């Protein structure tokens, strides 16, 4: 099968707590975004990669120079938008005329450097014949509490939330090109900004499939997350399961 990859990387990283966007933070000899791109650069089924960057991005050129290797997927960039969904839509527009309406597009976070190759294979294998598409996710395991009167430190517990049937969304998320474009266009026309691609499809009445992934597919949100990601990547290297971007 053939698929296309879109990677939104235009966020401000406001919660990261360090200088510069988190996708350019150093991680095990590379940057976070290089690790996030690595599984797709090495996959001959990936026809092209489009990365949506902030208008004032200053880090990509250094990364691009290291990605230009023979035998890897083509990587192009576009300017991103104010919201994640805007960045995804702008990247999708760059594929117009090349990606067919029924071809698959994967959307993966630039801040997820630990995607396991087995999870990618499971996603592609399970959804290859699916009419809508779906996403990697993991069942919620922790007890969930709803805060009383806001989310600040010291908030009291308003209630314990039933976790049965709840899943934590991961990426990649995988949908048909034409349907994903239509879902995002419809959401934006209504002034709605989905937090992920699956939500845009849900608003159209679709039911994306949940494909169980690994908890190690973590998202870098704070500086502390870099240590966890480094441990995951180092463990894979020691097990002979890749470990190099």
Image: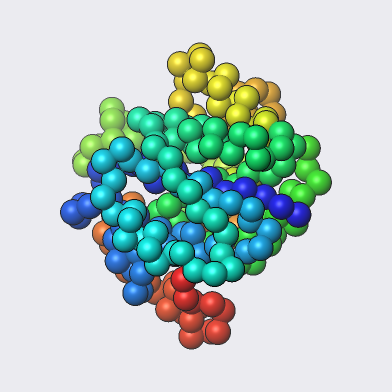
Residue 31's place in the image compared with 2, above or below, is below
User: In front: 221, or 98?
Assistant: 98
Residue at horizontal 76 percent and vertical 54 percent from the top: 1
Image quarter for residue 103?
top right
Q: Residue furthest right?
A: 129
Question: Residue 202, position in %: x, y?
Answer: 62, 28
Q: Which residue ends up furthest to the top in the rendered image?
A: 190
- Seen from the viewer's position, the closer of residues 116 and 189 is 189
Image quadrant where residue 207 sits: top right
The residue nearer to you, when weighing 205 against 61, is 61
The total number of labels drawn is: 0
98 with respect to 50 (left or right): right
Residue 210, placed above or below residue 222: above
Residue found 39% across the figure and 37% down from its top: 79
In which image quadrant can residue 182 be found? top right
| Residue at 62% from the left image edge and 48% from the top image edge | 4
Place of residue 113 in the rendered image (x, y in percent of width and height, measured from the top left): 44, 61
Residue 96 location, x and y as percent? 61, 34
| Residue for point 37% across, 43% down | 53
Colour scheme shown: rainbow
28 to the left or right of 162: left
Asked whether the viewer can see residue 189, the reply is: yes
| Residue lying furthest left | 19
Q: Is residue 212 visible?
A: no
Whether residue 107 sits left or right of residue 1 in the image: it is: left
Question: How far from the left and from the top, in percent, is residue 210?
Answer: 66, 46
């Amino acid at each position: 099968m053939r698929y296309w990859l879109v990677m939104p990387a235009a966020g401000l990283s406001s919660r990261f707590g360090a200088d510069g966007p988190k996708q350019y933070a150093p991680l095990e000899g590379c940057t976070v975004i290089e690790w996030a791109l690595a599984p797709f650069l090495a996959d001959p089924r990936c026809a092209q990669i489009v990365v949506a960057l902030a208008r004032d991005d200053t880090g990509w050129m250094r990364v691009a120079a290291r990605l230009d290797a023979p035998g890897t997927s083509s990587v192009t960039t576009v300017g991103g938008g104010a919201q994640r969904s805007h960045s995804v839509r702008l990247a999708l527009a760059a594929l117009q005329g090349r990606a067919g309406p029924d071809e698959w597009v994967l959307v993966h976070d630039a801040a997820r450097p630990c995607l396991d190759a087995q999870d990618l294979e499971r996603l592609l294998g399970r959804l290859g014949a699916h009419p809508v598409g779906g996403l990697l996710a993991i069942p919620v395991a922790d007890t969930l509490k709803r805060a009383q009167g806001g989310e600040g430190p010291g908030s009291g517990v308003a209630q314990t939330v039933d976790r049965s049937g709840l899943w934590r969304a991961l990426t990649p998320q995988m949908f048909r090109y034409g349907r994903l474009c239509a879902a995002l266009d419809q959401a934006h026309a209504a002034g709605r900004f989905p937090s992920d691609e699956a939500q845009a499809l849900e608003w159209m009445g679709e039911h994306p499939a949940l494909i169980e992934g690994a908890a190690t597919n973590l998202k870098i949100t704070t500086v502390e997350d870099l240590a966890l990601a480094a441990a995951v990547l180092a463990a894979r290297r020691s097990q002979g399961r890749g470990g190099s971007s």
